[in-house]
Amino acid sequence: KQRQKNRRLTPIRAKVERPFAVLKRCYGWVRVRYVGLARNAAHLWQLRTAFNLQLVALRA
């Protein structure tokens, strides 16, 4: 029963977890860099923007 549930959820989980894996592996987003939520949110926004630009470049 658990395996069936995991097989159903695996494609969804892969789509959600892949961007985080790329951010961690390619962009070094392992720990937060700054003290404070605003700076860390801005840094994450920059990383996500770079990731999205990379996706656009690969698909073009």
Image: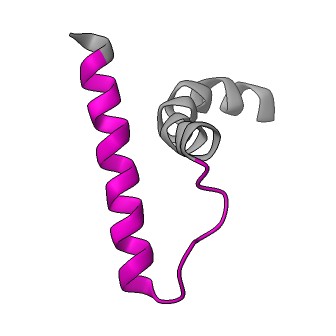
Give the main secondary structure, helix, strand or loop, of the magenta stretch: helix
Task: Name which quarter of the figure residue 46 lies in.
Answer: bottom left
Q: What span is in magenta?
A: 28-57
Residue 28 image offset from top left, x and y in percent: 61, 49
Residue at x 50% of width, y 32% of height: 12
Magenta segment includes 45:
yes
The colour scheme used to paint the residues is: one colour
Foreground of the two, 28 or 12 = 28
In the image as oriented, which residue stretches furthest toward the right?
2
Residue at x 40% of width, y 51% of height: 47
Task: Name which quarter of the figure residue 57 lies in.
Answer: top left
Residue 36 image offset from top left, x and y in percent: 47, 89
Residue 39 image offset from top left, x and y in percent: 39, 79
Magenta segment includes 44:
yes
Residue 11 image offset from top left, x and y in percent: 54, 24
- Please tell me whether residue 44 is drawn above or below residue 6 in the rendered image: below
Quarter of the figure with the N terminus: top right
Residue at x 32% of width, y 25% of height: 55
Q: Is residue 57 rendered to the left or right of residue 13? A: left
Task: Name which quarter of the figure residue 14 lies in.
Answer: top right
In the image as oriented, which residue stretches furthest toward the top?
60
Q: Is residue 28 rendered to the left or right of residue 44? A: right
